[in-house]
């Protein structure tokens, strides 16, 4: 048989050895007590996969388990690569004629190994038989932060869609789900003290239709808890984002008093960057932020909270008496300096709640008077410059350069028939694969501040989850390899070869994917 497991992302090393492993049905999973949670989650994933695909349906009645063959999950304290911290992702997976052994020192490691094994099942299980070449895989990631952002404000994705996407993320060993929960076009987080945020802010008039129809929705506390728990079981952390003080139309529609002009405002049903933002001279915006953060801290256990901070227009602040008073009071010259003041207040609010703020790179701008607190993590999106600047100032950085491969709302290919932003040009899988979170301009010290990278899916042009999948794949597969695999181990032609097998896996899971040219 061809010795090609075609794993994505490419592991640190795969050595093929003599022989073949074969089981009629799937091998039984056994393991150390330490890993019982991971094994349970993995079994649930397999059942889920079975529901989604015809892959094992024929054997479903006999539980498709080969009780004579085993995959054994073993605790191995010795595994702890030099670059691993407490959250070590390292694992070893050994396939021999008589069985498969997975070893790791942590739950995350074992779970990663089981995802590699899940890939093998999704591609190598045929006619009720799993056949694998004997091999030894040793593996650990290059970056700790391997993220995906989903914009749930422009399009409201259902909770089941998000859970399904989390399972597909875990297949690619992605471990950060950045949940964009508000924007001009919708507010998705219930905040008990501010009920109108969801009552009014979660719905917008659908102007594509001749008749009056409102579109949108919000996640209940139960939805959120269950998604966070679902992700945690898959070793994925969820980072909520509430974008302040710009992209505020939905907030202002609910609470017009928080704007400079007092309105009237509406939840936007057009796309773009809008002039109306939260009033920098009104202290009530901080009351709102306190309650929003209380809610986030209650629902999201991960130490990071994203505060947005992107694309704030300053026109309203220029002409608002309250904002002008605030400028004088703080002895500032330019209205844009008010944003750095807002940012520093928000960062401190989060620090009091034991949370670390993440901001889009604009939080670096105009902050001479109110320096960006050192612990703030910066997401570089306009290009690489923001990330370079932030790392030099000592901030931790997540690289998500839009045109350099990370903005997955751009077209995959330059054709009028491809979905995607029309102004942006093509962003091919090759382009995604060619990005690197550490750019040539970065010194070794700069590079040490790079936590990793992230693919972002903005949803202005998305009107169904299946279209989101089409935009994500296979570019997210390419990015997963960028974030996981050592640079010297990456090769696009080899990735493209493996992708042929990997596409079968996505097909088996019923995941939509773009199938045209990759570059
Ligand atoms: Zn104002």
Image (cartoon, rainbow, N blue to C red):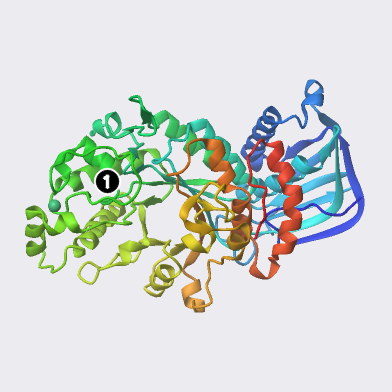
State whether residue 343 is above or below residue 504: below
State whether residue 126 is above or below residue 406: above
The residue under the point 49% across, 66% down is 450
Q: Name the residue under label 1.
A: 248
> Is residue 254 found left or right of 440 in the rendered image?
left
The residue under the point 49% across, 76% down is 442
Q: From where the camera sits, is residue 400 visible?
A: no
Q: Of 67 and 462, which appears nearest the observer?
A: 462
State whether residue 137 is above or below residue 171: below
> Is residue 86 found left or right of 284 in the rendered image?
right
Q: State the SS at label 1.
A: loop
Residue 263: percent from the left, percent from the top? Answer: 15, 41
Residue 230: percent from the left, percent from the top? Answer: 53, 36
Q: Residue furthest top?
A: 61
Number of marks in the rendered image: 1
Q: From where the camera sits, is residue 196 visible?
A: yes
Residue 34: percent from the left, percent from the top? Answer: 64, 42
> Is residue 157 found left or right of 73 in the rendered image?
left
Residue 259: percent from the left, percent from the top? Answer: 17, 46
């Amino acid at each position: 048989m061809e010795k090609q497991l075609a794993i994505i992302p490419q592991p640190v090393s795969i050595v093929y050895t003599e022989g073949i492993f074969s089981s009629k049905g799937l091998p039984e999973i056994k393991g150390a007590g330490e890993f019982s949670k991971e094994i349970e989650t993995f079994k649930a994933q397999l059942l889920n996969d079975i529901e989604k695909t015809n892959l094992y349906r024929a054997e479903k009645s006999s539980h498709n388990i080969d009780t004579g063959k085993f995959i054994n999950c073993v605790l191995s304290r010795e595994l702890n690569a030099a670059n691993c911290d407490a959250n070590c992702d390292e694992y070893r997976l050994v396939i021999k004629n008589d069985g498969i052994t997975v070893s790791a020192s942590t739950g995350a490691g074992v779970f990663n190994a089981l995802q590699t094994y899940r890939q093998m099942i999704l591609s190598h299980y045929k006619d009720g038989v799993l056949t694998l070449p004997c091999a030894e895989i040793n593996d650990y990631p290059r970056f700790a932060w391997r993220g995906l952002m989903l914009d749930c404000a422009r399009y409201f994705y259902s909770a089941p869609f998000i859970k399904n996407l989390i399972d597909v993320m875990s297949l690619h060993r992605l471990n950060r789900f950045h949940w964009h929960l508000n924007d001009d076009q919708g507010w998705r987080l219930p905040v008990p003290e501010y009920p109108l945020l969801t009552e009014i802010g979660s719905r917008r008039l659908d102007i594509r239709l001749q008749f009056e129809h409102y579109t949108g929705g919000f996640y209940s506390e139960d939805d959120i808890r269950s998604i966070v728990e679902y992700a945690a079981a898959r070793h994925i952390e969820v980072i909520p984002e509430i974008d302040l003080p710009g992209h505020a139309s939905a907030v202002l529609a609910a609470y017009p008093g928080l704007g400079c002009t007092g309105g009237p405002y509406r939840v936007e049903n057009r796309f773009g960057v809008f002039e109306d933002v939260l009033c920098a001279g009104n202290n009530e915006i901080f009351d709102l932020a306190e309650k929003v953060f209380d809610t986030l801290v209650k629902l999201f256990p991960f130490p990071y909270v994203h505060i947005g901070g992107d694309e704030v227009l300053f026109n309203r602040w220029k002409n608002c008496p309250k904002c002008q008073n605030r400028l004088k009071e703080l002895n500032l010259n330019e209205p844009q300096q008010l944003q750095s003041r807002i940012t520093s207040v928000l960062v401190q609010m989060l620090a009091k709640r034991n949370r670390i703020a993440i901001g889009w790179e604009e939080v670096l701008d105009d902050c001479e008077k109110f320096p960006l607190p050192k612990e703030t993590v910066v997401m570089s999106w306009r290009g690489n410059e923001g990330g370079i600047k932030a790392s030099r100032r000592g901030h931790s950085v997540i690289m998500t350069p839009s045109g350099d491969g990370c903005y997955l709302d751009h077209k995959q290919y330059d054709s009028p028939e491809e979905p995607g932003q029309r102004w942006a040009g093509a962003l091919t899988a090759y382009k995604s694969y060619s990005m690197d979170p550490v750019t040539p301009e970065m010194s070794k010290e700069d590079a040490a501040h790079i936590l990793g990278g992230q693919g972002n899916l903005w949803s202005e042009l998305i009107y169904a989850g299946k279209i989101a999948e089409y935009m994500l794949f296979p570019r997210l597969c390419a990015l997963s390899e960028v974030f996981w695999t050592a640079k010297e181990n990456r090769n696009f032609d080899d990735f493209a070869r493996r992708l042929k097998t990997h596409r079968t896996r996505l097909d088996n899971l019923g995941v939509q994917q773009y199938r045209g040219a990759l570059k």
